[in-house]
Image (cartoon, rainbow, N blue to C red):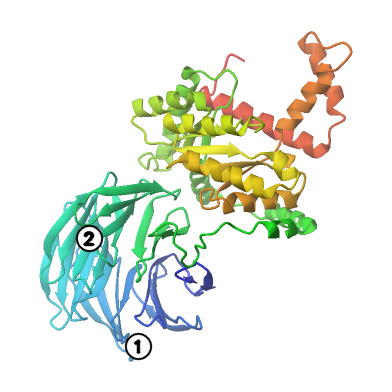
Amino acid sequence: MLRQGDTGDWIGTFLGHKGAVWGATLNKEATKAATAAADFTAKVWDAVTGDELLTLAHKHIVKSVNFTQDSGYLLTGGQDKILRIYDLCKPEADPQEISGHTSAIKKALWYSDDKQILSAADDKTVRLWDRASMDVVKTLQFDTSVSSMEYIPDGEILIITYGKTVAFYNALGLDLIKTVDAPAPINSASLHPDKDFFVAGGDDFKLYKYDYNTKEELESYKGHFGPVHCVRFSPDGELYASGSEDGTLRLWQTAVGKTYGLWKCVLPDLEWIAKVKVNHPAVLRRAQQIQSRRAVKKEWQAAWLLRAVTCIDLTTLSGDDSPSNVYRLCFKAKHPIREDLLKSMNMHNKGITTAAVCVYPSRVSDAVNALEAAKCCIPVASVATGFPAGQTPLKARLEEIRVAVENGAREIDVVINRTLALTGQWEELYKEICQFREACGEAHLKTILAVGELGSFTNIYKASLVSMMAGVMDGFVFIVEGIEHVWDLLDRRVSARAIPPRNVQKLAGALVEKLGNISQQELTNLVQSMRMRCTAVLQAAGGHTRY
């Protein structure tokens, strides 16, 4: 897929591979693109029209492609441990082949004005080859496999990442300049064109920014929901991009607050929100189509279910929450699947955990302590702003966020003020969420839309837009079925009876009677909610309760 660099806008998609794409590159003029894929091919494309120009067959998975400066040759490397050089003017000719690595090649680059080749492989080496003789000139040996390489010809610097280390080499002689150690395994790093600082990303979902000269960590932040596999600065240094296992590519501004490309740093014009409409019948048709789709089966179903577990915020939001049941919840978050089941799927050593543990602000410190005791880095999320009703004063809602963050919450799930949404006060809602964002500091902010209380699809869409415009997690919005009002409605109706029920049998009869006056859709939501809550209680208790 090709996108505009400064805005992220979609330009076009290259369609043709029949397997996962492992590598992609543009030539110097951005007129041609090359891709490496798991279908045992490398392809060359016209980057302007999107047409496929060449298909270069290989004997195994291709992981890396790179053009020479004149775009006349293409270098490839992959799972079969062989480097290949294709003459793009004579695609029918056999490629030149270079052997020497003992494990799969992860990255291959043209080097030193295309006179040399640099390659990194799973054999824990980086090798420099002479293009003319195809012999090894120099070999760098590492303790672990190299995860990435970036070559900066202008500054004659080579950046290599391996394990938790970012290493900088003099490109002329491959002499080590310096190393910087990060808190987690690093998959990629990129140096700013001015060489003042560099950014790195890895397995802990975070991006780190370091001063290149002093090696001081300037800041770190989390925006992805999976390991970061690639980071790169734009040629002008105004922004950098990060690609993650969560399936997203994110653009980050180098100088925050500067008007550039996507970032129009002025207050948004919210008047157009009033003009937004949603096609209700079309939404319902689309929902029916999704429900009728055939589900994956067998091992693919198991794989997707395991992935779903890693996306869950395991939650307890009960009035009787205590340190003991929060501790049990944290233990379940670290071990969400029985060990014997994981071993049967050969997934027992893959670190399957839930995405987060979610609690009330008053229980955040309990959850943090429990996870630290378990030596687990699962983040703690906290609901806030008067969950679930959101009817407390703004000052109290902001203070609740600050307390949760001070106690160790790394994610804050706020509920929006539904009154503002229902009365069309979108600018006021925007200002409130901006204040929530500021109160969160470095913690991530997510908004909970109680959609059952917003009245219409149009209001749901508008509330989502306003939340994203206010800077919520780059557009991460929770959509929660509004079942709370059903419980409240039942409670009020039963309590208002002339003779309130005085035992369980009479309470059950009153509930059955009052349920008859509630819509079928609300009843469905209520039943689903009860089922999920009961399941959550059983899981938190290890499958057994005294009830």
Residue at 18%, 64% in the rendered image:
126
Residue under circle 2? 160
Note whether residue 338 is visible: no
Is 166 positioned to the left or the right of 534 in the image? left
- Circles 1 and 2, Cβ within 8 Å, touching? The answer is no
Residue at 27%, 58% in the rendered image:
197
Report the amino acid beneath label 2. Ile
Q: Is residue 395 above or below residue 99?
A: above
Residue under circle 1? 91
Q: Position of residue 192 (x, y in %)?
A: 29, 63
Q: Quadrant of residue 168?
A: bottom left
Q: Is residue 466 above or below residue 544?
A: below
Mark 1 and mark 2: span between their CA atoms?
A: 32 Å
Q: Position of residue 294 (x, y in %)?
A: 64, 54
Q: Is residue 73 above or below residue 493?
A: below
Q: Is residue 438 above or below residue 228?
A: above
Disc 1, SS? loop
Residue at 75%, 43% in the rendered image:
422
Report the amino acid beneath label 1. Pro
In-front residue for pair 344/23: 23
Q: Position of residue 398 (x, y in %)?
A: 54, 34
Badge nearest the viewer, 1 or 2: 2
In-front residue for pair 216/461: 216
- Near mark 2 (Cα within 10 A), the count class, few <14, some 14-19 or many ≥20, is many
Is 23 positioned to the left or the right of 444 in the image? left
Q: Position of residue 479 (x, y in %)?
A: 63, 44
Q: Quadrant of residue 284?
A: bottom right
Q: Residue furthest bottom?
A: 89
Q: Quadrant of the C terminus?
A: top right
Say which label, 1 or 2, has the lower sequence index.
1
